[in-house]
Image: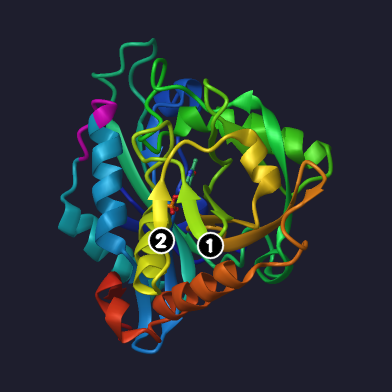
Amino acid sequence: MKPTELIWFNGEFVKWEDATVHVLTHGLHYGTGVFEGVRCYETEIGPAIFRHDDHIARLEKSAELYYMPIPYSHEEIRTATKELIARNGLRSCYIRPLVFRGYGTMGLFPLEAPVDVCIAVWEWGAYLGDEGKQAGIRAKVSSWRRISGDSLIPHAKASGQYLNSILAKIESHKSGYEEAILLDDHGHVCEGSGENIFVVRDGVIYTPAHSGGILDGINRKSVMQIARDLGFTVEERAIARAELYLADEVFLTGTAAELVPVREIDDHRVGDGRPGDITCAVQKLFDDALFGRAEQYREWLDPVEIP
Ligand code: PMP
């Protein structure tokens, strides 16, 4: 990660190296934080943030679910983010807003600890590699199950919950795969460690229902709309593990990863081992949407004014 000049921290623009916290910060001990992953692209209409309002809205929802009142409005966070990008002289970047319980009280009752907010931006290439985006990646079904709604809140993007993804990610990495696919408590396919999943069989695109234990991905929503606009049928339903091996095509979506084809799962080749036609068609229009080349999706872009 290449440092930028400034980070927005509790309402102020501070130097990257000065954006620090006390070691007794509540969130550091108990994972009491919520965050977002957002991207700004150099688009046809200049630098623009993809589905910015949706990301801030999800941040607010995640915070609310963990009883964390954000001391800044939606509009303040939106404006701060855009100013931060401009002041750092970036034209495309990854954006990480984080809301967390700060320094002041310890113990498991957090409601008296302050709520701190920071936003960092930095240049970040394709999370699963450019090669992965082009040729597809190899994935492994994790031995770890995705956190269940009985114990945590899969719909929230909360810091502590990511220990689940991290265990799966380390396991897949140590076994020589690029990504993990997690099943839910019932053995149904859930999602990647940081991506939603789509399975194509006989020309139909399937994805686990958002009422299941998945994060309701913003790119998932976008890709479903794009695929339908292209005339494909997209169905939300439970997906059995074996369907991953029987699929014609599989792909993942997420802000960091964007749209990544999966070419192999548990050493079974997916389709003919190359990104399939439907994946490629959706990926192309999705990329056009991200980069402002598709007029019909321009409303998804929040332009950043560069002085
Ligand atoms: N699932 C998980 C567990 C994630 O961390 C992410 C990344 N935020 C996603 C799905 C994809 O969500 P989005 O498309 O909103 O980035």
Q: Which mark is residue 12?
A: none
Q: Which class describes the residues within 10 Å of circle 1: few (<14), some (14-19), or many (20+)?
A: some
Viewer-closest of 307 and 199:
199
* Mark 2 Cβ inside 8 Å of ligand 1: no
Q: What x and y, as percent, mark residue 3? A: 57, 62
Judge whether residue 41 is colored magenta. no
The spot of residue 142 in percent (x, y) is 68, 32
Question: Residue under circle 1?
Answer: 203
Mark 2 — residue?
233
Q: Is 115 situated above or below 80? A: above
Tell me the distance, in whole angstroms, between the alpha carbons under discs 1 and 2: 8 Å
For the stretch drawn in magenta, the main secondary structure is: loop
Nearest the viewer among 54 and 237 is 237
Badge 2: residue crowd in 10 Å (few <14, some 14–19, many ≥20): some
Which residue: 77% across, 61% down?
A: 273
Badge 1 residue CB within 8 Å of ligand 1: no
Can you give x and y, in whole percent of width and height, for residue 230 in the image?
40, 74
Q: Quadrant of residue 259?
A: bottom right
Q: Report helix, strand or loop for mark 2.
A: loop
In the rendered view, tell whether residue 307 sits above or below residue 110: below
Identify which residue, 62 or 89, lies in the foreground.
Answer: 62
Tag 1–tag 2 contact (CB < 8 Å):
yes
When the figure is inspected, residue 48 is found, relative to residue 145, above or below; the finding is: below
Q: Residue at x 41, y 56 (%)?
A: 234
Horizontally, residue 198 falls left or right of residue 150, namely right
Q: Can residue 72 be spotted in the picture?
A: yes
View extreme (bottom): residue: 44
Decide which of 103, 293 is in the foreground and name it. Answer: 293
Q: Amino acid at mark 1?
A: Gly
